Image (cartoon, rainbow, N blue to C red):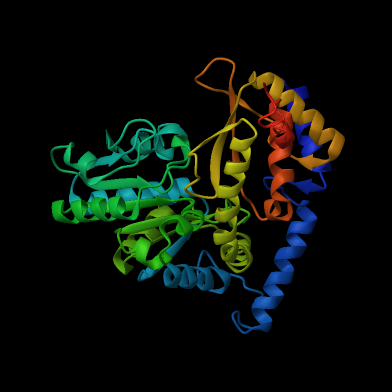
Amino acid sequence: MTEDLAARRRTAAAAATRHLTGGRPSPAEELRSLADHLDELTASGALEAGSAGWDSYGEHGTVTLLERRVAKLLGTEDAVLFPSGVMAQEVALRVHCDAAGTRRVAMPNLSHLLVHEEDGPRRLHGFEVEHLTTGAKVATAEDLAAIPGRLGAVLAELPLRDGSYLLPTWDELQGLSAACRERGVALHLDGARLWESQPWFNRPLAEIAGLADSVYVSFYKGLAGLAGAALAGTEDLCREARVWRRRQGGTLFTLMPYAASALRGLDEHLPQMAARHEYAVAWARALAERGLRTVPAEPHAVAFRVYAPSEPDAVSDRALEAVERDRIGLPMAWQPADVPGWAWCELTAAASTLEFDLDEAADLIAQVAGVSRPDPSSAGSAG
C-alpha cells in the first residue's frame, strides 16, 4: 500500500461522523472523557479525594483500583496492570515455566505470540514451543494428549483471533482444563477478547477464569481503552509478575492514563457485551442473506470474518470511496481470500455499531462488497 493511499484512508476515517465498526475520538475529546470519568470515580468515593487517581510506579490510585476490580471480576487472588499484552503474556508463561523447571510450552500455531510478536517469546525467554493445534481449530484435551513429555505451560487463546475468532464449547474448555490439572501443567488463557467471549459461554467471568491458572485480559480492544492489559492469578504469580514487569521496563513512572481508560471501559463497555454478541449473530445472518459468507457462520464472539465474491482491491476501493462520500467509517482494507477472486475482512460489533439499524449495517457492507440484497418480490417469479 502506498503512503498516499494510507494517508487518504486516515483522512477519510478521521472525517467520518458515524462508525460502523468502531472509531476513535480526537485526542482532546478522549482526554476530556477520561478526566470526566476520574471526576466521577472521585465523587463516588472509589478514588481518594485530592489524589486525582495518580499512581507511583504502578502502585496506589487508579492502578490499585483497577487491579482490585479485575481480580474481583475474574475471581482471582490478584491482578497486575501491564502497559501491553505482549509483555503480560510472556511474563505469565515465564513465571509458570520457572516454577515447572522447563521452558517448553504448548500453544496454537496461530497464537498471537507466534504470529505477531517478532519471535519475542523465544528470543526473550527461550521458550521451546510445541503446537497445541494447527490452523483454525480450538484446543481440546485430545490435542494436549498428543504432545508427549514435560510442559511448563499450556496456552489457549479465547477466541482464536487468526482462526476467525473461534471459541471452544464450555465442555471442551472444561476438558482442556481438567487435562492440564491431571497432567500437572499450568493453563494460561490468552483472554485478549475474554470480555467479548463471555456471552458465548453464558457463564460468569469468574467461572471461565477459574478453569485456568492465569488469565490475561486486554483493555484497548472491546473496552476501548488507550492501551494496557492485566494478568490475573494467584498472589504468588502476581508477585513474580510484578518483578518481571520491572525487569522488562513496564513499571512506568505512572500507569494512570491506561488504568483510567480501563476503568471507564469496565463501566461503559463491559455491560454491552451481551447486546454486541446478539447484534453480531444477527448481522452475520443478514450478510448471508445478501450473498456474503461469514466465518463462523454464527459468530462465537462479537467479531467475525466476512467473505465477499470480489477482488480485494476493488472492494477496498469501493469502501474508501463510500467512506469519503458518506462519512461513515467502514473497513477499508480487504484481504485476498484463499479462494481466488474473493476478499475478506474482519467485522466487530462495537459500541458504535449498535447505533445502526441491522439492515443498514448489512447493506453498507454488501454495497462495498459488490453484492445487492435480493428482491423479495422476485421470489418464485421465474417460469
Q: Is residue 89 visible?
A: yes
Q: Is residue 120 left or right of residue 148?
A: right
Q: Position of residue 261 (x, y in %)?
A: 63, 62
Above or below for 323 versus 272: above
Residue plotted at (40% across, 32% down): 119
Image spot of residue 67 (x, y percent): 48, 68
Image location (x, y in percent) of residue 189:
36, 52
State left or right for residue 269 relative to residue 240. Answer: right
Q: Is residue 113 left or right of residue 372?
A: left
In the picture as drawn, the residue positioned furthest to the top comes out as: 340
x and y, in percent, of residue 218 in the image: 51, 54
Camera-nearest residue between 251 and 35:
35
* Picture residue at 46% right of the left edge, 35% below the top: 162
What residue appears at the point 68 percent right and 41 percent down from the top-left corner?
Answer: 362
State the residue in front, 210 or 29: 210
Residue depicted at 62% across the width and 37% down the height: 289
Outermost residue toward the front in this view:
383
Residue situated in front as seen by the camera: 90 or 232: 232
